[in-house]
Image (spheres, helix red, strand yellow):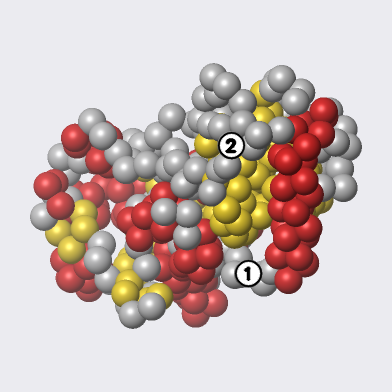
Amino acid sequence: MTEKKTAVTLGSFDGLHKGHMKVIACAFEMQQKHGLLPLVLLFDKHPMLTVSGKAPDMILQPVLRDELIAKTGAGKRIISFRDVKNMSCREFFDEILIKRLNAGGVCCGWNYRFGRNNEGNSETLRELCEEYGVEFKITSPVDHNGEPISSTRIRQAVECGDIALANAMLGREFRYKQTVVDGQHRGRLIGSPTINQRFDEGFVKPKKGVYASVTVVDGKEYPSVTNIGLRPSFENEDFRSETCILGFSGNLYGIDIEVRLLAYLRDEIKFGSMEALSEQIHKDAEKSKEIFENRGEDGNV
């Protein structure tokens, strides 16, 4: 049990988008008013994976999710969904929130569901908080273009290559962190060394094409150009991310590197010669530098 009274945030937090961050902000309001410790409750696996055997594709890897939560200053607690999926709403509230997490406050979004078979909603949670004398706050939806922001909308935007829309709903740049794998060093032949990365199984697949991007190496951000897909100018390729880091030189093989997508530049094209490919890469690089230099702090270009 947590010794200090906590302000527990409830939700899926699978994307940490603007709606999720609004819920976490409520916990900090409770900290200011009542001295409660902000705490984000997470499940070890997406609930749908346990319930149906298939979870929605990830739009944020756990390692990056945890980094972003840490930057807010909130604590986190990860529990097994399998252990709680058959609990009634009251059992979950009493056993997990009160006894295990010592909740003095609870925050959730407007569409929160919990309890066995999702039998409870935010109003059920409000009633339990009133009964137990626990502070309660429910957040209203955060809209973008007249519709509530959701992980589903963000996932669809990424799959369609609308990174500007995805970033606007996330409130930051869509990103992934993967180990650099050895390629065939073909980028060096055209004066543009690249890093190759494969995506985790179950991670959302961005639309095939070329993106303006940011690559983070040792905490420093570099403008970059990222090709996602099968690289049609070469034969027998697997789906991967290939990024040319502008203004950087060094060996990154075997290192986990973070890439953030800024804007979709163009579709993949099969070039007839290395010279034509090289010329296009230089054009993409100039455009990426321009976008990098003019991007906003919230992920909007």
Indicate whether 178 appears above or below 133. above
Q: In this view, does 253 lie above or below 219?
A: above
In the image, 213: left or right of 175?
right
Camera-side residue of 169 and 23: 169
Helix, strand or loop under label 1: loop
Give, as a three-letter code, the residue at label 2. Answer: Lys
Q: Which of 38 and 67 is in front in this view?
A: 67
Q: Residue at x 65, y 44 (%)?
A: 226
Indicate the position of residue 98 as horizontal and vertical percent values.
31, 55
- At horizontal 35% and vertical 60% (from top left) the residue drawn is 153
Look at discs 1 and 2 and give the one toward the viewer: 2
Quadrant holding the C terminus = bottom right
Residue occupied by mark 2: 270
> Which of the two discs, 1 and 2, labels the residue nearer the N terminus?
2
Furthest residue toward front: 272
Disc 1 from disc 2: Cα separation? 28 Å
Q: Residues within 10 Å of mark 1 (few under 14, many from 20)?
A: some
- Locate residue 186, reporting x and y percent: 75, 26
Which one is nearer the viewer's eye here, 159 or 41?
159
What amino acid type is highlighted by mark number 1? Val
- Give the residue drawn at x 71%, y 65%: 291
Q: Residues within 10 Å of mark 2 (few under 14, many from 20)?
A: few
- Circle 1 residue: 301
In this orientation, does residue 141 appear? no
Residue 224: assigned label: none
Q: Residue at the location (27% across, 41% down)? A: 47
